[in-house]
Image: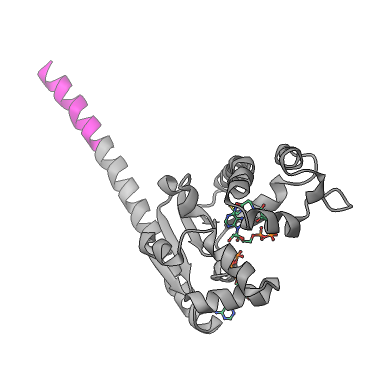
Amino acid sequence: MFLVGLTGGIASGKSTVSSMLRELGCPIIDADDVARKVVEPHSLAYRRIVHHFGPEVLLESGEIDRKKLGQIIFANEEKRRLLNSITHPEIHKAMLKEMVFYFLRGYRYVVLDVPLLFETRRLTQFLNHTVVVYCDPATQLLRLMQRDGLTQEQAEQRVAAQMPLNEKRGLAKHVIENSGSREDTHRQVLRLHTKLEDSMEFLLVRVIAVAATAGLGGILLYAAKMFFS
Ligand SMILES: CC(C)(COP(=O)(O)OP(=O)(O)OC[C@H]1O[C@@H](n2cnc3c(N)ncnc32)[C@H](O)[C@@H]1O)[C@@H](O)C(=O)NCCC(=O)NCCS
Ligand SMILES: Nc1ncnc2c1ncn2[C@@H]1O[C@H](COP(=O)(O)OP(=O)(O)OP(=O)(O)O)[C@@H](O)[C@H]1O
């Protein structure tokens, strides 16, 4: 199965780009969505979070108070590492299950939208392509403050909790520049979609060629054995 990793910085525009790709028919596995599911009440990750962070990170309904937990972990690296060590193995397991689901349904490829793709590095070895959604630091900060109602200090703290976006940009095979308008981003997404479709066809042709060569080699070997024995 052909795997495409989509990543970027906080509020750089990953969801915006992944919903454009979804409209073009790409199946998307969203790590933020998966991360919400794995901490639902009474799951293993939920119980471990309550054990380590205490009942003060729960809402009255018993669900995790994500706002409160976010305030704690973005202000404290040790606590962030602890939360990551609880949630990441569960997130990766659940994502793998989703990939198998798509594979069994006959999908040829899937896009993995993973904010911490290059930080954790667990998935990168399995990917055929990586895409970074980039926007300039001032725009990123402004969009983050506006979307999540954060102060500049809080927003800066969240940006600092991730690998610098410039560094991620250098690691990716494709970059979507999302500092401008949505229309501009949409045009780049269309181009990327075409490129991905082309490289999938190319990969398919290569696999068929390798299989055919191996088959032919086998036949020739068998014929040579028969001839010389
Ligand atoms: C801290 C939590 C409770 C905040 O929840 P909230 O609903 O406010 O934000 P949401 O989950 O939508 O995340 C928003 C963005 O924050 C960034 N982010 C989230 N967790 C982390 C983290 N541990 N380290 C760095 N950045 C992070 C990502 O860019 C993400 O896209 C939540 O993000 C969480 O449980 N994080 C740990 C799991 C995780 O690493 N998720 C990221 C996907 S792998
Ligand atoms: N090109 C754009 N022009 C204007 N606003 C945009 C553009 N791209 C994204 N936004 C806005 O910026 C904010 C962040 O975008 P988005 O939610 O797609 O980022 P994200 O990378 O998925 O964030 P997170 O890491 O928190 O999941 C949103 O409010 C979105 O509507």
Q: Residue at x 68, y 54 (%)?
A: 72
Quadrant housing residue 54: top right
Camera sees residue 102: yes
Please provide percent x and percent y for residue 219. Answer: 23, 31
Seen at 34% across and 57% down, the residue is 202
Viewer-side residue, 116 vs 181: 116
The secondary structure making up most of the magenta span is helix
Residue 153 placement (x, y as % from top left): 61, 70
Please state which of residues 192 and 228 is positioned toward the viewer in this rendering: 192
Circle count: 0
Residue 190, compared with residue 113, is above or below; it is below
Q: Give the left or right position of residue 164, taking residue 93 as reference.
A: left
Query: Which of these two is toward me, 145 or 182?
Result: 145
Q: Nearer the viewer, residue 105 or 153?
A: 153
Residue at 53% x, 83% y: name it.
183
Q: In which quarter of the image is ligand 2?
A: bottom right
Q: Which residue is drawn at 72% across and 54% down?
A: 69
Q: Is residue 59 left or right of residue 112?
A: right
What's drawn in magenta, residue-wise?
216-229
Residue 25 in view (yes/no) = no
Residue 224 among magenta residues: yes
Locate residue 35 relative to residue 61 in the image: left or right.
left
Q: Residue furthest left?
A: 228
Residue 49 percent across, percent down from the top left: 72, 42
